[in-house]
Image (cartoon, rainbow, N blue to C red):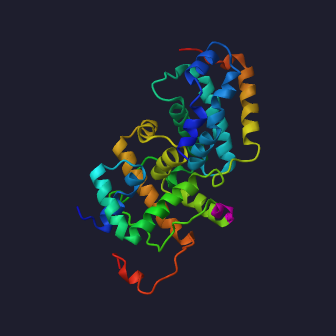
Amino acid sequence: MKSGEATATADRDEAGLIARILAGEKELFHELIRPYERMVYVTVFAIVRNETDAEDSAQDAMVNAYRHLGKFRGESKFSTWLATIAMNEGRQKLRKLKRAKEDSLDEPVQGEEQEIAPAPLRDWREIPLEALERKELREALRSAVAELPGIYRQIFTLRDLDGLKVAETAAALGINENMVKVRLHRARMMLQKRLVPFLKTTAPARKGFWGRMPWS
Amino acid sequence: MELNCKHVWAHISDYIDDSVAPELRADIERHLEHCEICSAILDSTRNILVLTGDDRTFELPVGYSERLHERLARELANEANAPTKS
């Protein structure tokens, strides 16, 4: 999933495209952003958490990127710059919607230093992608992500849904790389814990197996 | 080094991202060979990442792309907003 963005843009000379847009070939902006339509939507969706507001914010983010394209310096990748704009747009929308008070995107949540133990399960090696045909699984995945505390949700979205590298995620959020890794780990463990009940185990239950769990 | 389960869990995320030191990686793999609990936790975490990253999980609204480009077309038509090298 992380290679998708790389392959979509590998053959593109984005710096060249941007220079031409700034020189007056404005229509090329459509082409420039095409590989990132999904990334921008998913990024803002993770913040505002509903389709209508996410679509509005995604459009606003793209418009903002266009208006400020002259400020893009090429020090970061265009995708990282765009993800940062999307994130800011999402936050702004959320403030307008006044939902921020219940779930801060910046404040560490209590117990951040505590370890999260993953959920035990018997076996789940054979989860085919066809499992996604199950509507309830897709729903469970979406709400599990949506219900992550804000700081973890943003990191998970940038890193695992948008495919940004650790360094790029750190740059987009203005935190250090180690913090990204720590929070990403917690986000993934929270999802694992939350989603295990939805997983169909494939191995037959064996007597006494649960009794051997290290935490029991 | 002999790792226990909790030690392995602490590194699952870095292990998946292939960002653990080679020695630690070898220790984790030795543990995974005989620990089916940790193996299942690792596999389930990996699978969750594959599933959440699948396009079908977070579907784009129908017509999203068309509406986006229509909005951009209106924006691009407005000379006053044209970006310039600053």
Q: Is residue A72 above or below residue B20?
A: above
Magenta includes A166?
Answer: no
Q: Residue B73's x, y, as percent?
A: 75, 26
Q: Nearer the viewer, residue A166 or A174?
A: A166
Picture coordinates of residue B12, whole percent (x, y): 39, 58
In the rendered view, tell whether residue A204 sits above or below residue A187: below
Picture quadrant of residue B9: bottom left
The N terminus of chain B is located in which quarter? bottom left
Q: Is residue A132 covered in magenta?
A: yes
User: Looking at the image, which residue is at 67% across and 51% down?
Assistant: B59
Left or right of A25 in this view: B35 = left
Write the start and end of the magenta stretch as one range.
Answer: A130-135
x, y percentage for residue B80?
68, 17
Q: Please determine whether, in this image, residue A13 is positioned above or below residue A167.
A: above
Residue furthest left as drawn: B1
Residue at position x 35%, y 57% in the image: B11
